[in-house]
Image: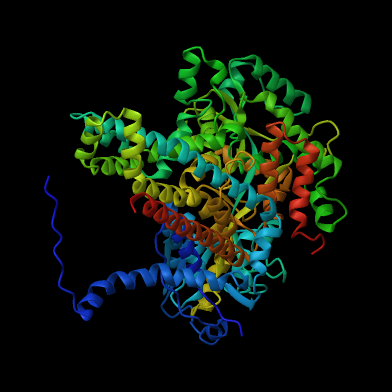
């Protein structure tokens, strides 16, 4: 097989570069950097409605860790975000990988199945959340109706009303919607593995699992890293599906509460006139945590890849 | 030095964190003192007053109402603009900051309006507006919590009661209960039939404090308890209040199994489809019920006082749903005040009832719809206030959030009625000081 030769580019004049970068940089600054900096500054002040008060240092940050309802709501919501991440890694990404491998092997109907699995990903998550609320309704939902019809009455639970099942229902609904995403990424990575390597391994007599462990998996690692980081960010920011399923309070009794819901309640539903300060502090903490962990994960993965590929 | 800033940056970071979307730009700062000097508009001179609202569905009806005002006040044009309900608070707060805000605006009630009052964005109207026609107990909805001053005129009220399907009652030979024994007998009879006695969306926590007021207000004593609570001579752990929460638990016998998994919309379907005979809920349900089930013969009643009840008569908890207020920065202050006075009049109240088909905050309105008329009479017969909304939404966590979560815990068997009361009391005690 021929390898593509890389041609060296002529260096772009500096000003031309600036002209190309400027529109995106301007939008990024106005719509991302500026509000980020504003929220950071808001979090250091006291507030009365939209009236900014005095500089109070880290008091808003202290409040979100110590004051009611945050002292209980914050660890509760945060633990659910971590659970959503773990659940997505275990179910969504492994099943996504298995689907990608299965589809990689079949030839003709690959496109059809890829489209089918990726379809929910194109629907608004809020719509998906409400749709599953209807499907899982203990009164009118078809899921429990089918379970009862086939004699599995003991499994016809109030899925979204029981705290032990509600958060797992959200893990499942999220996985149902996003399964096509890791599948497509892994599929593309699998397609990029040169055939001659697997052919050489076949000639050397490698078995299926050995081939996966020594060839496919290491070559999938960059995709795995990307999927893991995006899953982490998605799980930490989870909002539309938990909101559609459990409302802004994370019903039942806070069992589906997540950080973004806590932020939403604090910012938009709180009776506290100082809520701009506390909600800004919450938003900044969440941002810093997501940003920090995502960067750390990226660095760890780069190191891992370097070790593997030299 | 204090300076004013738009809250949009915050919304922006919310959008950034949640969805990666972008915020709008900030409005320039302006002080309220500037507006005072420019308030020289004469109502006889041509003037255009803008009113902002979250009632996108009522724009045409409000235009009809304001046509009446315009006809009686030559030269005055009223422009009614409505924005998406869920985004209205941010849009209004930002609009009131800048120079392109409305002259008047619909504002949220009770705790919901405090941020605007505290930020000095609303005109104080004590002595400037004649509120004698307004139901006096509702004025608290537009009153500053800290200064006790009036900042607007309430326009709509809601009342809590039990809706029932008269067809099902007739079929089973049941009548509206007037005593607790009759109430229990009606529900037992419904339980024995194919119908579900009560539809309740317990999965949606906000519905539970409403249900508690409907079932328990007479038990804990409604206005009497509220006075003592606000004065500090009792709190939510009071035995009567605990007993009222326990009544809520007893009512689960009259609901479907797994009621904790039933959402609000599902409970509406239960009632509309005729599988449930009763729907304990707010007057805001009426329009939807009449549209979705036009053939259903609807009845309403108040839950009679149970044994040991503090109140000897049934109570109907109510609250103001919102107010009209004047932008502190308006350039048309005099014309705005004239309009606000009209919004506090019986003429507007009746137009509001006839056009918008909701309950007015003005006293003595005539309701042509028989169910509305009956709800109005129920409220007049035993007026009470929805305490966890009216008084317990001035801080974080709000009373209604706490009792909603608490009752869910009780339905799940994790909390007793006393635990729920304790949870509520401890939560609001972080910001609520009796007598303040």
Front residue (pair A90, B356) = A90
| Up-down relation of residue A73 to residue A201 (above or below) | below
Q: Residue at x 50, y 72 (%)?
A: A38
Q: The N terminus of chain B appears in which quarter of the rendering? A: bottom right
Q: Which residue ends up furthest to the right in the rendered image?
A: B233
Q: Please state the horizontal and vertical placement of residue A205, each as a whole percent of the image.
A: 27, 28
| Up-down relation of residue B83 to residue A114 (above or below) | below
User: Number of callouts in the render?
Assistant: 0
Q: Please state the horizontal and vertical placement of residue A260, each as a whole percent of the image.
A: 53, 53
Front residue (pair A128, B213) = A128
Q: Please state the horizontal and vertical placement of residue B244, each as a whole percent of the image.
A: 78, 37
Front residue (pair B314, A70) = A70
Residue B263 appears in which quarter of the rendering?
top right
Q: Residue at x 67, y 51 (%)?
A: B389
| Up-down relation of residue B395 to residue A186 (above or below) | below
Front residue (pair B283, A156) = A156
């Amino acid at each position: 097989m021929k390898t593509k030769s890389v041609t060296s580019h002529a260096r772009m004049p500096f000003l031309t570069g600036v002209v190309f970068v400027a529109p995106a940089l301007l939008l990024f600054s106005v719509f991302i950097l500026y509000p980020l900096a504003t929220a950071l500054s808001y979090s250091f002040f006291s507030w009365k409605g939209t009236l900014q008060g005095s500089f109070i240092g880290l008091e808003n940050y202290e409040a979100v860790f110590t004051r009611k309802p945050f002292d209980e709501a914050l660890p509760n919501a945060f633990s659910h975000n971590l659970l959503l991440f773990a659940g997505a890694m275990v179910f969504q990404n492994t099943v996504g990988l298995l689907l990608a491998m299965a589809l990689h092997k079949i030839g003709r109907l690959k496109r059809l199945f890829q489209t089918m699995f990726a379809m929910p990903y194109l629907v608004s998550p809020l719509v998906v959340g409400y749709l599953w609320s209807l499907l899982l309704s203990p009164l009118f939902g078809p899921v429990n109706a089918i379970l009862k019809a086939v004699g599995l009455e003991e499994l016809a639970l109030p899925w979204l009303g029981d705290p032990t099942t509600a958060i797992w229902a959200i893990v499942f609904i999220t996985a149902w919607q996003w399964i096509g995403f890791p599948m497509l990424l892994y599929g593309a990575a699998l397609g990029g593995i040169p055939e001659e390597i697997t052919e050489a391994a076949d000639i050397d007599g490698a078995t299926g699992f050995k081939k996966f462990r020594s060839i496919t998996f290491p070559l999938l690692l960059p995709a795995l890293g990307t999927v893991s980081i995006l899953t982490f960010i998605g799980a930490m920011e989870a909002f539309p599906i938990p909101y559609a399923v459990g409302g802004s309070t994370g019903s039942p009794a806070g069992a589906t509460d997540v950080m973004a819901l806590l932020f939403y309640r604090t910012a938009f539903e709180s009776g506290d006139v100082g809520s701009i300060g506390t909600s800004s502090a919450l938003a900044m903490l969440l941002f810093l945590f997501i940003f920090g962990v995502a960067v750390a994960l990226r660095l760890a993965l780069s190191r891992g890849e370097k070790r593997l590929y030299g | 030095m204090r300076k004013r800033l738009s809250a949009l940056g915050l919304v922006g970071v919310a959008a950034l964190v949640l969805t990666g979307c972008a915020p709008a730009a900030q409005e320039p700062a302006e002080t309220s003192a500037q507006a005072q000097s420019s308030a020289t508009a004469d109502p006889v001179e041509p003037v255009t007053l803008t009113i902002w609202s979250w009632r996108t569905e009522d724009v045409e009806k409000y235009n009809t109402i304001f046509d009446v005002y315009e006809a009686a006040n030559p030269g005055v044009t009223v422009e009614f603009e409505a924005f998406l309900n869920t985004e209205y608070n941010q849009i209004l707060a930002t609009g009131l900051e800048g120079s392109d805000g409305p002259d008047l605006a619909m504002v949220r009630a009770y705790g919901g309006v405090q941020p605007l009052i505290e930020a000095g964005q609303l005109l104080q109207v004590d002595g400037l507006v004649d509120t004698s026609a307004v139901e006096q107990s509702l004025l608290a909805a537009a009153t500053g919590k800290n200064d006790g001053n009036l900042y607007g005129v309430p326009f709509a009220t809601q009342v809590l009661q039990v809706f029932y399907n008269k067809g099902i009652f007739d079929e089973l030979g049941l009548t509206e209960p007037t005593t607790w024994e009759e109430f229990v007998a009606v529900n037992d009879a419904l339980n024995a039939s194919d119908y579900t006695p009560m539809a309740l969306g317990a999965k949606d926590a906000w519905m539970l404090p409403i249900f508690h007021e409907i079932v328990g207000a007479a038990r804990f004593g409604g206005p009497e308890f509220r006075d003592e609570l606000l004065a500090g001579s009792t709190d939510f752990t009071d035995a009567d209040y605990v007993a009222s929460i326990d009544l809520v638990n007893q009512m689960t016998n009259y609901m479907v199994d797994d009621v904790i998994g039933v959402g609000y919309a599902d409970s509406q379907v239960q009632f509309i489809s005729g599988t449930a005979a009763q729907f304990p809920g707010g007057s805001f349900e009426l329009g939807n019920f009449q549209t979705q089930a036009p053939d259903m013969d609807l009845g309403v009643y108040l839950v009679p006082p149970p044994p040991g009840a503090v109140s000897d008569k049934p109570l109907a908890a109510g609250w103001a749903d919102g107010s009209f207020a004047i932008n502190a920065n308006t350039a048309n202050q005099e014309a705005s005040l004239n309009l606000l006075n009209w919004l506090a009049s019986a003429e507007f109240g009746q137009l509001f009832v006839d056009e918008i088909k909701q309950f007015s905050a003005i006293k003595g309105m005539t309701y042509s719809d028989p169910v509305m008329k009956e709800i109005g009479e129920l409220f007049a017969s035993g007026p009470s206030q929805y305490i966890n909304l009216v008084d317990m939404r001035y801080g974080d966590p709000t009373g209604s959030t706490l009792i909603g979560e608490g009752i869910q815990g009780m339905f799940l068997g994790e909390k007793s009625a006393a635990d729920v009361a304790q949870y509520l009391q401890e939560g609001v005690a972080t910001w609520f000081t009796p007598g303040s």
